[in-house]
Image: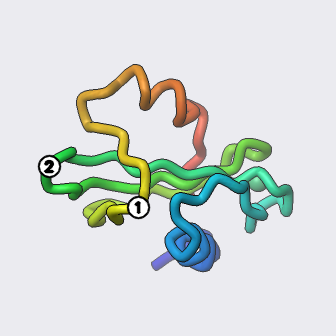
Amino acid sequence: MKQRFKRWLPIIDSINSMLPMREKLVCPNCGEKEVDYAYIGNVETRVGYMVVWCGNCNHGIHVSRVKVPENAELIAFEDEEKFKKKVPAVIQYD
Ligand SMILES: [Zn+2]
């Protein structure tokens, strides 16, 4: 696993321990409190992926094949409108 990716792992833990997390977290890349996240998945199986990103520097990560926790908000795979509204198109994946 790349170092640049690894530095986001504590953030994922924080998000998951505080679901449904609404507060933004501190970015491991730029240090601003601008980190947001989204779970995208299948509404029935709740299997999908997670995207975590910083609204300031646009760095982020994509985590595939996750089970979306029951208390997390899930954006359905087919809900492109909601996805586009939430997840910036400019994320630079670490
Ligand atoms: Zn940042």
What whole-number distance in Å separates the C-alpha atoms at marks 2 and 1?
A: 14 Å
Q: Of the residues under marks 2 and 1, which one precedes in the sequence?
A: 2
Q: Is residue 3 visible?
A: no
Left of 34 or right of it: where is 8? left
Q: Which amino acid does label 2 sit on?
A: Glu
Choose top left, top right, bottom left or bottom right for residue 35: bottom right
Secondary structure state at the residue bearing disc 1: loop
Residue at numbered disc 1: 71
Q: Which amino acid does label 1 sit on?
A: Asn
**CB within 8 Å, label 2 to label 1:** no
Q: In this view, does 57 lie above or below 46?
A: above
Question: Residue most toward the top?
Answer: 81
Left of 11 or right of it: where is 1? left
Instruction: Pinpoint residue 82: horizontal percent, then vertical percent.
Output: 43, 27
Report the quarter where the N terminus lies. bottom left
Residue density around tag 1, few if under 14, some if 14–19, many if 20 or more, within 10 Å: few
The yes-or-no answer for disc 1 within 8 Å of ligand 1 is no
Residue at numbered disc 2: 44
Q: Which colour scheme is used?
A: rainbow
Ligand 1, seen in the image, is in the quarter at bottom right
Which residue is drawn at the image coordinates 69% and 50% (left, top)?
54
Q: Is residue 59 visible?
A: yes
57 and 34: which is toward the camera: 34
Q: State how many labels appear.
A: 2
Left of 37 or right of it: where is 68? left
Q: Is residue 66 above or below residue 55?
A: below
92 and 45: which is toward the camera: 45
Q: Which mark is residue 94?
A: none
Q: In this view, does 94 lie above or below 7?
A: above
Residue density around tag 2, few if under 14, some if 14–19, many if 20 or more, within 10 Å: few
Which residue is drawn at the image coordinates 33% and 55% (left, top)?
49
